[in-house]
Image (cartoon, grey):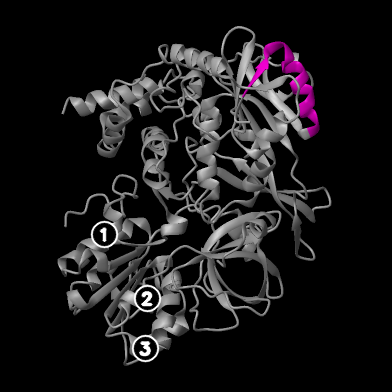
């Protein structure tokens, strides 16, 4: 079965059947925002949500992740994680799925990262297609992430009325829908309804940038020394929020924690942010990326230029988190547009 | 790294250090200490110019250049300046202690290209440490290289590393050696002045010469200008860059210069490659130079 239909009223039932496949995490309301957290009952989730504070990246690449256990005397190391847990991510937006695909490209690249790959093996992704814009900060259409583009096991699309369409995209996905009396294969009429819903949705989305993505790429290729970066740098307060919430930021530090016996401990990697003023500073005090302008430029180039050359992928997913969280009101869409203006003015 | 199957890969960790046994620890200057390290029955199999990640459990890890040559078997050597948390802790260790070692990482000096050519080595301050690996290699494989000149500069005679070896280099007839100090002391009989002052007088056949320059960031600008005046081609000017390598695996991001991960693509680069990193190289390294 590649395409199926499930009635909205049967979702709680299906949700309960997923519990035996792994621990389920989904979007829940937290005050005025949303977070991915453990879900026991279907009703706890908010299926209609704007991007969560942290992206589901945290299940693939946790904020603090043990890499190895060590012993000082006598010198010894041991595996930190014996067994990775089975996890189901429920109702993941297509932008965040794109983010996971970006991280996959990085951590699968030689030398590959066993922690990431082990987690990926055990995670099942159930996507949830957005039928309208989250808010004015999203730029998913510019990078083509407003529509599903793989990277999930099952994708749910609200086709109106009482039904969700399901796109089953992997063996893991098939396991979740097999032998369910309330999930039926899609018929011709259902396919028409899906097409109608998706066509209607596409009318609501349009490129958020002033130029197409090729022009953006060209601007990043040529505008490394643009005055736009000085302007962004002047406004940036260096809080690092933008890099903390980004679904494709993957910089980290490595730290050791000793237990109270001062002999056993754990070495972990923890998220680190290129916006911190000591990010590129070495022990002698030399700072190899001084200035908030240079650091902001670096962040943008790590989304729109460097990974395009290396992985043929934009590492901006268009989720809008960096703009929503910026304390100084720096907008990604405005920055990219300013760069395009600068380029066109030449 | 050996080819691994996917299933094998899932069970391994590139973050796991192997045990290194310190068999010699010698204070060489007030701030620098030399460690000779043995890996259980194995050679490090590095290329001169590569680095290792040195671990002290509970303290952390730091990238350190290897200063011995792969032609020296059974051990490798590190010369460590006491500057940060890890290096200070390392300085407290004596022979018999253990450290964790990951690596070697990165690209070293392009030995295959350099073979058959003349070599000009320009070392400033601590730059002699990674260059010592190359110098030992060249001296061990002397017939593979053309004329070899070594220019060494440091702040004062007291700061000069590898003093006994340097005396030996001075006596050798198969290499030219010249050194200078920024500030002399009463016993000093040699040159006084910046290292750049040694380059104009050096006899160089530019097309046949590979110049290898390692020193503090600020030194590069001035030395490279002199080398370009000698008309050495930009792809034959080789440098090694210092950066904050945390993982060594091209992932953690700290060592990045524009799109380049120094821990993987470097730390050794040609001046030609540096020019493509304009804007993110340190002021001394590449900004500026009109060639």
Residue beneath disc 2: B111
Chain-order first, disc 1 or disc 3: 3
Q: Is residue A13 magenta?
A: yes
Q: Quadrant of residue A3?
A: top right
Residue beneath disc 3: B142
Q: Residue A238: x percent and y percent? A: 47, 29
Q: Which mark is residue A77?
A: none
Q: Which corner quadrant holds the N terminus of chain A?
A: top right
CA distance for labels 1 and 3: 27 Å
Chain to which the residue tagged by mark 1 belongs: B
Residue in view at x 24 percent, y 62 percent: B224
Q: Please, which residue is most extreme toward the front here?
A: A188
Q: Residue A258: x percent and y percent? A: 76, 49
Identify the element where label 2 is drawn.
helix
Left-right relation of B98 to B176: right
Q: Residue A123: x percent and y percent? A: 67, 37
Closest to the observer, B143 or A179: A179
Q: Can residue A134 be seen by looking at this rendering?
A: no
Count the numbered circles shown. Answer: 3
Share a chain, discs 2 and 1?
yes
Q: Residue A114: x percent and y percent? A: 63, 51
Chain to which the residue tagged by mark 3 belongs: B
Identify the element where label 3 is drawn.
helix
Identify the element where label 1 is drawn.
helix
Q: Neighbour class for label 1 at 10 Å: few (<14), some, many (≥20)?
A: some
Q: Neighbour class for label 3 at 10 Å: few (<14), some, many (≥20)?
A: some
Q: Quadrant of residue A330?
A: top left
Residue beneath disc 1: B272
Span colored in magenta: A4-20
**Circles 1, 3 touching at the beta carbon (< 8 Å):** no
Q: Is residue A196 above or below residue B64?
A: above
């Amino acid at each position: 079965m590649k395409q199926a239909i499930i009635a909205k009223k049967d979702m709680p039932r299906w949700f309960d059947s997923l519990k035996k496949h792994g621990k389920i995490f989904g979007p829940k309301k937290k005050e005025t925002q949303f977070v991915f957290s453990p879900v026991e009952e279907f009703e706890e989730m908010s299926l209609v949500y704007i991007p969560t504070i942290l992206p589901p990246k945290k299940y693939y690449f946790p904020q603090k992740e043990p890499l190895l256990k060590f012993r000082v005397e006598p010198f010894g190391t041991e595996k930190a994680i014996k067994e990775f847990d089975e996890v189901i991510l429920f109702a993941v937006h297509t932008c965040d799925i794109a983010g996971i695909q970006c991280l996959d490209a990085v951590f699968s690249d030689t030398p590959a990262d066993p922690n990431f790959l082990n987690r990926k093996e055990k995670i099942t992704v159930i996507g949830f297609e957005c039928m309208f814009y989250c808010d004015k900060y999203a730029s998913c259409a510019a990078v083509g992430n407003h529509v599903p583009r793989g990277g999930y096991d099952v994708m749910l699309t609200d086709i109106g009325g009482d039904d969700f369409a399901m796109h089953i995209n992997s063996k893991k996905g098939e396991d979740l829908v097999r032998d369910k009396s309330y999930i039926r294969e899609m018929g011709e009429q259902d396919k028409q309804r899906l097409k109608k819903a998706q066509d209607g949705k596409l009318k609501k989305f349009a490129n958020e940038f002033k130029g197409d993505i090729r022009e953006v790429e060209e601007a990043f290729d040529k505008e490394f020394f643009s005055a736009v970066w000085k302007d962004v740098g002047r406004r940036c307060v260096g809080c690092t929020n933008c890099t903390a919430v980004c679904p494709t930021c993957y910089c980290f530090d490595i730290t050791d924690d000793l237990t109270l016996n001062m002999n056993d401990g754990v070495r972990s990697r923890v998220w680190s942010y290129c916006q911190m003023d000591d990010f590129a500073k070495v022990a002698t005090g030399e700072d190899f990326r001084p200035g908030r302008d240079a650091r902001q430029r670096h962040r943008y180039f790590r989304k729109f230029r460097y990974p395009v050359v290396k992985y043929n992928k934009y590492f901006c997913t268009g989720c809008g988190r960096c703009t929503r969280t910026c304390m100084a009101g720096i907008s990604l869409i405005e920055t990219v547009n300013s760069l395009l203006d600068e380029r066109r003015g030449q | 790294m050996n080819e691994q199957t996917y299933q094998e890969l899932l069970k391994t960790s590139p973050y796991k250090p192997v045990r290194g046994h310190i068999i010699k620890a010698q204070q060489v200057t007030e701030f620098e200490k030399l460690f000779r390290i043995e890996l259980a029955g194995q050679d490090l199999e590095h290329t001169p110019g590569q680095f290792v990640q040195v671990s002290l459990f509970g303290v952390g890890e730091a990238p350190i250049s290897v200063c011995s040559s792969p032609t020296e078997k059974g051990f490798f050597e590190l010369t460590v300046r006491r500057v940060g948390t890890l290096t200070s802790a390392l300085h407290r260790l004596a022979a018999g202690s253990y450290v964790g070692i990951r690596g070697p990482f990165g690209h070293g000096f392009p030995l295959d290209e350099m073979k058959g050519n003349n070599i000009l080595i320009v070392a400033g301050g601590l730059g002699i440490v990674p260059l010592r690996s190359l110098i030992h290699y060249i001296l061990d494989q002397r017939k593979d290289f053309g004329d070899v000149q070594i220019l060494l500069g440091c702040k004062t005679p007291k700061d000069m590393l590898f003093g006994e070896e340097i005396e030996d280099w001075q006596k050798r007839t198969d290499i030219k050696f010249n050194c200078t100090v920024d500030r002399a002391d009463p016993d000093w009989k040699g040159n006084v002045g910046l290292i750049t002052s040694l380059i104009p007088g050096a006899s160089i056949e530019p097309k046949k010469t590979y110049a290898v320059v390692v020193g503090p960031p600020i030194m590069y600008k001035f030395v490279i200008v002199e080398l370009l005046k000698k008309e050495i081609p930009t792809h034959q000017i080789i440098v090694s860059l210092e950066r904050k390598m945390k993982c060594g695996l091209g992932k953690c991001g700290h060592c990045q210069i524009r799109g380049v991960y120094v821990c993987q693509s470097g730390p050794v680069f040609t001046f030609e490659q540096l020019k493509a990193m304009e804007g993110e190289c340190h002021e001394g390294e590449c900004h500026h130079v009109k060639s």
